[in-house]
Amino acid sequence: MGKRIGLEVSLSAAEAVKMADVDCIAAYPITPQTHIVEHLSELVNNGELDAEFIPVESEHSAMSVCAGIAAVGARAFTCTSSQGLALMNEIVHIVSSMRLPMVMILANRSLSAPISIWNDHTDVMSVRDCGWVQVFANNGQEVFDHVLFGYRVAESEKVMLPVMIHVDGFILTHVIEPVEFWETEQVERYLPEFKPVHALHPDRPVTMGCIAGPPIFSEVKVAQDEALIQSKSEIISAWKELGDIVGRNYKPIEGYKHEDAETLFITQGCFGETVSLAVDALRDEGKSVGLLMDRLWRPFPFEEFRQAVENAKSLIVIDRAISYGGQGGPLALDLRSALYKEKNEPIITNFICGLASRDVTIDDFKNIYNRSMEKIKVNPREEDFEYYGVRGK
Amino acid sequence: MEPTNVYAYKLVSRKEYFSPGHRACQGCAEALAVRLVGKALGRDTIAASATGCMEVVSTPLPFTNWNVPWIHVAFENAAAVASGAEAGMKALMRKGRLPKKKITFLAMAGDGGTSDIGIQALSGALERGHDFIYVCYDNEAYMNTGIQRSSSTPFGASTTTSPAGKVVPGQVTWKKNMPEIAAAHDIPYVATACPSYPIDLVQKVKKAARIKGPAYIHILSVCPTGWRLPPELSIKAGRLAVETGIFPLYEVEDGRYKFTVEVGILRPVSDYLKIQGRFRHLDEGMTGKIQKRVKEEYERLKKKVKMTQGD
Ligand SMILES: Cc1ncc(C[n+]2csc(CCOP(=O)(O)OP(=O)(O)O)c2C)c(N)n1
Ligand code: SF4
Ligand SMILES: [Mg+2]
């Protein structure tokens, strides 16, 4: 077992990047991601991590530099938040399409305007369809483990796609949590040297990033989608092996008191921990309620969700982003699609809350539960969703 | 004219790295410049290209004209992608994961990809000091998207977004001086070049590859399609740009300016302007303005040469 210490989650994320022995880091500072890049530059400048630190002039260049790094077959890391992600958006889509593996931590923060440095998932959802493998990490240990998991999956010959790790800004990035480091030997066993399928090198010239017209574009894009869908088996086996090596087990969806529950909360990110306490309190009141936390966001675990909700009568989906003019939050939209026309399709209610770190407490989740129970009596329509905890609503 | 120019084909490598069969227009001097740069750099090169004519004509999936490793990511980020490739290789070689080898990193973009949308990424890469060569192929407009003006389009030129209208006579701004902007980064090497002077061009690219640190080469690349010029006049137009003083060939090595092709008495700018359809609408007043400006800029450059070579 590796050493176990209390450390700010951003710093342990950086330590995990060091354990992954990355070759290059290209990043641009933005709150609440800053502590990660700051610690990484410290590690590099103190000679503790043998890597190039490229202090780029923007996030657009951060992602572009990472594309160049991965294209020559080196291990690249970057991290950003919100506006930084929005600025690099163009290239975020391109690196997955070009099958360039890398790992990015997104310290989740609201998108402007109004400008806000606080936490929600509006940035996450802006890149929902960017073609990356995307996972949520909900505590310091999960962040640490998923950096290594990220490279393992991204660089797998069967995947060759970039991996994004979602970490709630401030409420996770800035808290001190116990974290168990891996032994070097464990890392070596888990994460082999990056051997890219193709790399730019004069001895084997390849052309990357061609132009494609109508006769071939669709084939390329469908192949890309298939690669992302098929990455799930590799993701699951990478989690399994991680469990075998360090004894922590991860799944696409994590359940809490869910097996016999009539009603299930569905969450992404740190809200899961608060909801689990609300579930305990509601259970004490005799309510049949449980929780499913979505860890794997893309590829979306359709099958796993269908199975996990099989016995539930209703779902309460918590979203932390708005799909403007749409039918509820992005997570609810996916779940409704996943469960449409399933046998015993549960009734779905959807609550959007916690924007820009607005507090949602255990009592709030209990209120949400009660509100959901009222709503399902009248069988809510698909487009019915509620903003919770917003003045005037 | 230097006599060696006539024997260019004997003095540059016969090997093609930007091979025949690409889809550039007839008489495209940008394609010629790319070809010469490839010959100057040789096989041990990794190229990062911006979106633009040269990318589009050379890589229609599943074909490629590139015999060196080549990557295109987007329009504005060639300098950043090349930075990443350079840094990645440096790390891999230092950590013993790849055998050590001298590789030249080339970033290439058009004038739009350089002086407009890509200027930030370029400035960042020059400032960070990556060991790479940035080549701007300046055909003085966004040709790939249909001849729209850029900040590198010369005063007076008619383009599809600076059309010669009844009220506004084409481009109303003066060409952005990109080589000066690059030189202001205090990088070891900056040069201008033109494929009408192939030996000069090849020598500069080779020098840029020898020098450690960032180098910037700005290549005037005649575009018969966009300039409304018969393709057989491409090379001549490039020579006239130099002989009129509109596009002087010089280099800036460690801050010292030097003309690499001495022109002597400048020809009148009208010799250059009158063969191109994009300047057809210019009246005497406009031509006079251009003549005055060219003279002033040329004198300014001469002063820089004198000042920096003197010590
Ligand atoms: C972000 C972005 N904006 C606009 C475009 C459209 N576009 C592609 S190439 C190009 C012009 C290229 O001009 P230049 O860099 O001068 O190269 P040229 O084609 O003239 O060689 C434009 C506007 C794009 N691909 N990406
Ligand atoms: S439009 Fe101009 S630059 Fe583009 S390929 Fe044709 S001649 Fe060359
Ligand atoms: Mg151009």
Image (cartoon, coloured by chain):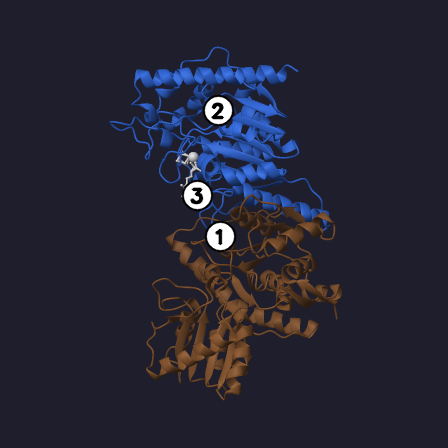
Total numbered badges shown on the rendered structure:
3
Closer to us: mark 3 or mark 1?
1
Element type at mark 3: helix
Which residue type carries mark 3? Answer: Val
* Badge 3 and badge 1 both on one subunit: no
Task: Name the residue carrying label 1.
Answer: A83
Give the residue displayed 64% in from the left and 45% down from the top: B87
Dot label at residue B196: 2
Give the residue displayed 74% in from the left and 50% down from the top: A47
Closer to us: mark 1 or mark 2?
1
Residue A335 drawn at (x, y percent): 43, 73
Q: Is mark 3 within 8 Å of ligand 1?
A: yes
What chain letter is assigned to the residue under label 3? B
Q: Which of A23 and B137 is in front in this view?
A: A23
Residue B78 in the image: above or below residue A214: above
Q: Earlier along the polypeptide chain: callout 3 or callout 2?
A: 3
Q: How far apart are marks 1 and 2 (CA)?
A: 45 Å
Q: How far apart are marks 3 and 2 (CA)?
A: 23 Å
Which residue type carries mark 1? Answer: Gln
Q: In which quarter of the image is the C terminus of chain B?
A: top right
Using a 10 Å C-alpha cutoff, classify the residue at mark 3 as few (fewer than 14 neighbours), some (14 to 19) or many (20 or more).
some
Using a 10 Å C-alpha cutoff, classify the residue at mark 1 as few (fewer than 14 neighbours), some (14 to 19) or many (20 or more).
many
Image colour for chain B is blue
Task: Name the residue carrying label 3.
Answer: B56
Residue A155 in the image: above or below residue A74: below
